[in-house]
Image (spheres, coloured by chain):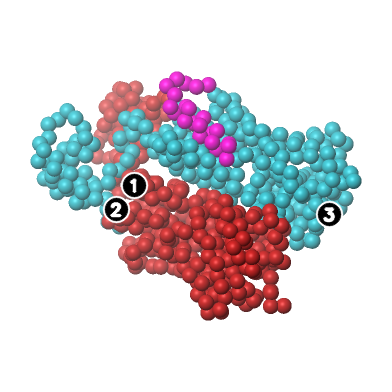
Chain colours: A red, B cyan
Amino acid sequence: MKNYATLKDVAELAGTTAATVSYVLNEKKGRYISEETKRKVLEAAKELDYVKCNGASSLKGKERKLIGILIPQFENQFFTRIIISSEDVFVKHGYDLVICNTLDKPERERAILNRLIQQRVDGIILTPTKEGTQNTELMRRVGMKMVVVDRPLVGLKDFFWVATNNYGCGYVGAHYLMAKGHRKIGYIGWDSKIPDLEARREAVLEVARANGAEVFVEEGEFSAAEGCRLTAKLLEQHPDMTAVFYGFNIQALGGIKCLTERNISIPEDLSVMIIGSPEWVMAGKNDFTHIDMNDLELGRKAANLLLDQIQSDDEIPFQHIIQDCTLVEGSSVCDIRK
Amino acid sequence: MKNYATLKDVAELAGTTAATVSYVLNEKKGRYISEETKRKVLEAAKELDYVKCNGASSLKGKERKLIGILIPQFENQFFTRIIISSEDVFVKHGYDLVICNTLDKPERERAILNRLIQQRVDGIILTPTKEGTQNTELMRRVGMKMVVVDRPLVGLKDFFWVATNNYGCGYVGAHYLMAKGHRKIGYIGWDSKIPDLEARREAVLEVARANGAEVFVEEGEFSAAEGCRLTAKLLEQHPDMTAVFYGFNIQALGGIKCLTERNISIPEDLSVMIIGSPEWVMAGKNDFTHIDMNDLELGRKAANLLLDQIQSDDEIPFQHIIQDCTLVEGSSVCDIRK
């Protein structure tokens, strides 16, 4: 690869010093430079395709107009929608977005945050991994503006947070199943070790308990294949189950595949409830009853909250914005009271 | 926001000069610095949470281990899969990925490329907008390593390109419809002005011509709503049409919605063929016959081709890798010869 031209290269071609080139190209004041020298420097820079390397100038506290966003799962439309809607807000305000995929791995999260701090981004939107609290420690110390989306920084209170009411997601879905007469329900979830996400399962269990219903819980990793495996397991162990509640959309995708392969008709043979609204739940012949978390609105709220911090002269108080979810009635839950 | 500590701040606290701090923190050789001073500098840097601002050091041609990727549509799983699979390759080789969304807007593409050049990334993966050729001019001049994915740099031959055989996508799909007896086909596409993408439509037209079939073409913008609108238009103007061929998956999503709302049964009333394999085409009750472009493999090939360039000591010759597509037979196309 051809190397980038340096200040020195430009200076050599222009017959002057690197310091002079720097003065001219950065339009610094305070030192006389002849028009002739200026012209030579500008021509040499053009001739050599000189591109300034960024970084150094940011030391002076200039706004970079750059926001970093860290998202853990790109195969999950919940997160790509948060990117799309927050980017829309940032772009309208003249900010550019650096999008990063942590793959839900704490060590990647740490490395990416470190890179973004070095890059002096103006702020960060983050869905933390399970070690997010430790990984954001330096950021919080140096006062990097930050909004946490979806999952919280476990153990902390003082941070900006925009999230879904996860307890509400489980609550609303379980209530609907109760109202339709279901009393033997399978629940399939992700053993994420993220307390806020576990609220989905807790809500289902509490609603069931209050209604004298049974819940068969199966939890495992966050993948379609696991959703399929856990569904098969539930079908085998609980043939009397009348409904399956999928707490996570990626597992649901695999779970529904498992049901289809076994020629189990939805909702005639088994009712299905899903948390999340990936395209497929309502596309084509699909019409699943699901809990919409209003993903796009989460991204917009997070972006606006970050911009508030960046653009305000005063320090604004920490806020937790917990957004409610909506049940979207499809045709995947049978009323078995009839 | 608390400002980041500068070299000067560290120097002040350590009771020495900024130059000395820089020597110590960058572990430069060639100048004697006492152990006592070193210790003071390191302690002061730690005390002040000094984080080096990157950029300056890259001027010296060091590898940044950073790759930029520019993708035009985040709502399109075709592209998020390219991100996922290429990132997987990069991460395994110790490279980190900066993901950028051009929103298919040439001026955004230009600004992002400029930022990435300033950031001195080691290479770039790019799906160009319609002005990609002009926008990559500087990159090509300074010798930035680059692999173009999906759409080409129109008018150029000398670049690294990994793409789908778009003509093949149209050809394979149209042939299948012919084999099932369809002779009046609607084709819905994106008026992208990107010649390579228009090959899909051209192939459908040519196959139809060779078989004495009629094709009714409707093209418009890249959105689900447009797919719905164009489908309604075709249904109205060509009630004798027996199949619809969707050239682009996002339009297909809206088109299928339009069919469902009108209670048109697929494939009994109308056959459907789709180019692309978003989750929804095979999820739940959906089982659409579609053309799989093997999105993940495109991303892997692009990443490997970029790494070859970065890691090779010699210049490697430009390559165009055109990947074939696969027809996945579902149940959305009726055999009307029977």
Q: Which residue is mark 3?
A: B269
- What segment is highlighted magenta in the picture? B296-317
Residue A235: which quarter of the image?
bottom right
Q: Position of residue B112 (x, y in %)?
A: 47, 42
Q: CA distance from mark 3 to mark 2?
A: 62 Å
The tag on residue A114 is 1
Q: CA distance from mark 2 to mark 1?
A: 9 Å
Instruction: Indicate the amino acid at tag 2.
Output: Leu
Are the residues flagged by discs 2 and 1 in contact, CB closer than 8 Å?
A: yes
Above or below, comparing residue A266 to residue A47 in the picture: below
Above or below, comparing residue A175 to residue A233 in the picture: below
Q: With B123 as the anchor, is A331 left or right in this view?
A: right
Residue at image position (71%, 57%) is: A263
Kindly tell me whether residue A308 is visible in this rendering.
no
Q: Disc 1 sits on a residue from what chain? A: A
Q: Position of residue A248 (x, y in %)?
A: 54, 60
Q: Disc 3 sits on a residue from what chain? A: B
Q: Which residue is mark 2?
A: A138
Task: Check chain identity for marks 1 and 3: say if they share one.
Answer: no
Q: Disc 2 sits on a residue from what chain? A: A
Residue at image position (86%, 39%) is: B213
